[in-house]
Amino acid sequence: MQMFTKILQSLLLTLLLSSHVIAKKDDAVSIDHIALATLMIYDGKYEKAHEELDIVNQKSPTFDAAKYYTVLGVLYSKEGKTKEAIQAYREAIEATKIKEFKAPKVEIQEKYLFSIGSHEKEKSRQPEFNPKKKRQEKLEQLYMYLASEYHKIKDYKNTVKSLDNAGEKGKNRAELFTLRAECYYKTKAYDSAIKALSTGMKLFPKSSTVLLKQKFYYLADFGLYQSAIKTAKEYMQQVNSSPKEYIALAQMLLEANQIDSAVEILEDAKLKFPKNAKLSFLLGHLYLKKDMKFTTANLFEESSYFDKKYLKDAVEMNRRVGQTTHALYLNTHNIDKVEKLKQKIALYLDAQEFRKIIGLKKALLRYKMLDDDNLRYALAYSYYMAGDYKNAEKELKHISNSELFNKATIIRKNIEKCTNNSLECL
């Protein structure tokens, strides 16, 4: 709407410059109330503008209906009275169609001695007045104002119709094609929306990026994902896109359950930005959705080379795929002591290295990690599996979590069986 606001402001300035507040006719002074109203609008004095327009004698032979209704339309538009503005502009259009356009009077300055004989030459330099062209220019401008008002009330069909009626003015900027496309889209004329954007791209190749982006969103919304991807790639080549834009595109495709297409986009992005950690990490998540866990583990590890915050995920993924030794190696690079210890315990549990977990007790106490019932239970379980029932019981007593407490009860019963009959634990 900012575009239409600028147009409206230029209209006011045009009206001000082309009007004379005081006009002389037959040596009598007459007040141009339309011009005064224009000044009032420009100053934001809308009530005063109405008062001036009310004074205008519409029955006068010199009454300029085209100008009157144009100013009235601008006034209503400024006041937010859209329907009234539409009616006024339509009246202005009809009046302009039958208005007689006359060549402006050219004031010829008095000629002095040395300019005698050059009068004819100067007269011939005056541009030829073309009333047809003048009428067309006025009508095109009025249709542009009309399009703006129709758009305000979401009358999309009449917005497009007015833009078409505006002739060259209705298609002299790329933004007008995005507006056309939006109107077609809102009225479910999807083919016309795409055609409008394609036309805009041909006419304004330097402004095609905005049109391409809008075209992509429409194609994706229509479910035409391959066409959407092609358009997106074209857009990204033109604007020299950042990883963020590739990620946003992939996420949009993912929301539409187009996992393979999202993978394709991120693979392209990864080739362009090989050191971007987030790209590798997100690509890993997509491969995980495709149940390609080893690929995910490799991509998570790769992302951790460039950003250590992804190291935890790399360790965990390698643990899940059974690469415990490699996971332990990656774990040694973790600078977060608490997180490093937690993961080490999880890895030792997977490898059934219970005595190694017991060996970490001092470290767990040092970092006050046994306040976490899960870690306390892991330690108690390790004592139990190592046959140290006394220490296992000692750790189990501190557990308060209800779920873990139930598990601890089972271990206690097993310990009791083992204590009473060692054959039970063979």
Image (cartoon, rainbow, N blue to C red):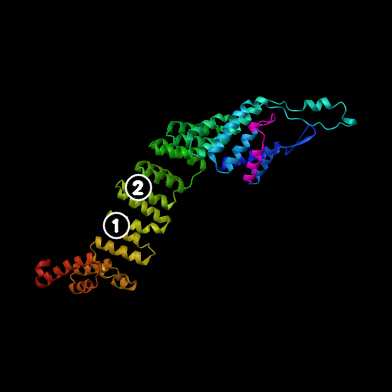
Q: What is the magenta range?
A: 45-66
Q: Quadrant of residue 371?
A: bottom left
242 horizontally vs 355: left or right: right
Give the residue number, with chain letter if any, for mark 2: 286
Residue 49 on the magenta segment: yes
Between marks 2 and 1, how big is the CA–CA gap?
Answer: 19 Å
Characterize the local packing of mark 1: few (<14), some (14-19) or many (20 or more) Cα atoms within 10 angstroms: many
Give the residue drawn at x 16%, y 66%. 410
267 horizontally vs 2: left or right: left
Looking at marks 2 and 1 on the same chain, the residue that comes earlier in the sequence is marked by: 2
Say if 133 sits above or below 255 in the image. above
Give the residue drawn at x 43%, y 31%. 191
Q: Are marks 2 and 1 in contact (CB under 8 Å)?
A: no
Q: In the drawing, what numbered circle is on residue 319?
A: 1
Characterize the local packing of mark 2: few (<14), some (14-19) or many (20 or more) Cα atoms within 10 angstroms: many
Residue 175 seen in the figure: no
Label 1, secondary structure: give it: helix
Quarter of the N terminus within the rendering: top right
Residue type highlighted by circle 1: Arg
Residue type highlighted by circle 2: Leu
